[in-house]
Amino acid sequence: DIVMTQSPDSLAVSLGERATINCKSSQSVLYSSNNKNYLAWYQQKPGQPPKLLIYWASTRESGVPDRFGGSGSGTDFTLTISSLQAEDVAVYYCQQYYTTPFTFGPGTKVDIK
Amino acid sequence: EVQLVESGGGLVQPGGSLRLSCSASEFTFSSYAMHWVRQAPGKGLEYVSAISGNGVSTYYADSVKGRFTISRDNSKNMLYLQMSSLRAEDTAVYYCVKSRGFYDYWGQGTLVTVSS
């Protein structure tokens, strides 16, 4: 199984400041035949199901604010919230869908400082 | 708008069985793989099982293999998870998810509690 790790476990950022979350996979999730990274990011608020933010490592889902951005390739990925808003307080998960089982990272909790 | 509505959760004793259902609407159900993902209280997300659009191919996490069975009825737009030999560690919210590889739609989840 591909093991996903995330750092940090949690972070607190001032409103309007940048938040950066890192995700690492134990093997590459870049599929060479189509040059796509099989990596997604989700946001989960308390009492709610996760919500898709980013797929193919950097493609923003429809309706997701453009302050959310994804980058990276191969085994190292980053989710950036360029200007943190109060409604962004949540736990963020990365997930690889390169091969079954589609494994998730342990999550990063984002709070307001 | 795509809707996924789970049902069938509840309290069950260790060793017992439960069948979860997921009703899907507002998309061509048979065209998509469907997955079950669970989340233990206060914990992260765990892939449980998957089934292809035509129901021919199925996948299971090692933690549930041999105990859980995923199935679907494309004529009714329904997804199922038959769970048997349940253990305390199966206690979780179970989400039905629509898969494009990534999970673009999630249900609200149904809570399964395994306890005596």
Image (cartoon, coloured by chain):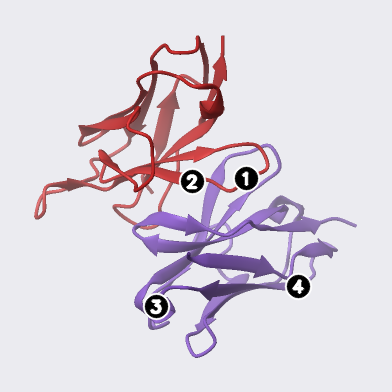
Which kind of residue does numbered mark 4 sit on? Ser
- Give the class, few, some or many, for how many residues have Cα within 10 Å of label 2's Cα (few <14, many ≥20): some
Q: In the picture, which chain is red?
A: A
Residue named by callout 1: A48
Q: Residue farthest to the left?
A: A33
Q: Nearer the viewer, mark 4 or mark 2?
A: 2
Cα distance, mark 3 to mark 2?
A: 21 Å
Which kind of residue does numbered mark 2 sit on? Lys
Q: Which colour is chain B painted?
A: purple
Residue named by callout 2: A51
Q: Quadrant of residue B37?
A: bottom right
Cα distance, mark 1 to mark 3?
A: 25 Å
Cα distance, mark 3 to mark 4?
A: 30 Å
Which kind of residue does numbered mark 1 sit on? Gln
Residue named by callout 3: B28
Q: Is residue A4 above or below residue B101?
A: above
Which kind of residue does numbered mark 3 sit on? Thr
Secondary structure under the numbered disc 2 in the rendered image: strand
Cα distance, mark 4 to mark 2?
A: 30 Å
Q: Is residue B95 above or below residue B81?
A: above
- Give the class, few, some or many, for how many residues have Cα within 10 Å of label 4's Cα (few <14, many ≥20): some
Residue named by callout 4: B17
CB-based contact (under 8 Å), mark 2 and mark 1:
yes
Which residue corresponds to the image point at 47% horizontal and 73% vertical from the top-left? B26
Q: Nearer the viewer, residue B1 or B113?
A: B1
Q: Are marks 4 and 1 on the same chain?
A: no
Q: Residue farthest to the right?
A: B116
The image quadrant where one finds the C terminus of chain B is bottom right
Cα distance, mark 2 to mark 1?
A: 9 Å
* Mark closest to the chain's N terminus, 3 or 4: 4
